[in-house]
Image (spheres, rainbow, N blue to C red):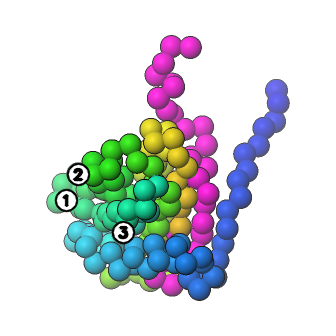
Amino acid sequence: MKKQSYQFEYEEYNSMEELNAEDALLLKLAKEETIHAYAPYSHFSVAAVARLSNGQIVKGTNQENASYPVGICAERVLMSTAASLFPGMAISTMAISYKSSTIESNKPVSPCGMCRQALAEFEDRTAGAIRLVLGGETGAIIVVNQSRQLLPFNFGKEDLEKS
Ligand code: THU
């Protein structure tokens, strides 16, 4: 038996003012974009805004449904949109924020497990790491250099291939 460990480094900022200008802009756009979420059930409006490697900005918001599991998270709406409008283009940075009518948005949001899986495959298929900038309306901001760091031992395409 060998003991193994998994560690990764991330950055934590106290406020938007500490971010570089490009990240601050993306997070600002994500905060503004929550208005386009459709979240009548959770009242938790999420927006993801990405800068692609060609410089284009693409946005997505969560879209819920009366049949709850049909709803889709902001991150996956964004990735589907990016892949459809700009096939094969990598996402350099994705900022994610949220607003809620029932709870305070004063700490970073973190992508759900399903989105982490989708993010990892998006990185693979575009051969590019996705930086994540995670923030609420106020409070600390977390920057992760590569989204797959949030999903160690992820299941992927190679698991379906003969070894
Ligand atoms: N949600 C997202 O869109 N992204 C996240 O990172 C976390 C959760 C959505 C799903 C659902 O519409 C609502 O937020 C509450 O879970």
Which residue occupies 49% across, 32% down? Answer: 156
Q: Residues within 10 Å of mark 2 (few under 14, many from 20)?
A: few
Instruction: Using the rendered view, name the quadrant where residue 28 is placed.
Output: bottom left
Please report whichever mark, 3 or 2, sits nearer to the chain's N-terminal start.
3
Q: Which mark is residue 50?
A: none
Choose mark 3 or mark 2, whichever is in front. 3
Mark 1 or 3: the one toward you: 3
For this orientation, the residue located farthest to the top is 162
Which mark, residue 65? Answer: 1
Marks 3 and 2, how far apart in space? 18 Å
* Above or below, 45 relative to 68: below
Q: Which residue is mark 2?
A: 70
Establish whether ligand 1 lies closer than 8 Å to the Cβ of label 2.
no
Q: Earlier in the sequence, mark 1 or mark 3?
A: 3
- What's the residue at 72%, 45% (across, down)? 6
Span colored in magenta: 134-163
Are circles 2 and 1 on residues that touch, CB within 8 Å? yes
State the image coordinates of residue 34 (x, y, percent, origin top left): 33, 75
Viewport quadrant of the C terminus: top right
Judging by the rendered image, the residue that carries numbered circle 3 is 47
Mark 1 and mark 3: Cα distance apart in space? 17 Å
Q: Position of residue 12 (x, y in %)?
A: 66, 72
Tag 3: amino acid: Ala
Q: As shown in the figure, which amino acid type bears the numbered disc 1?
A: Asn
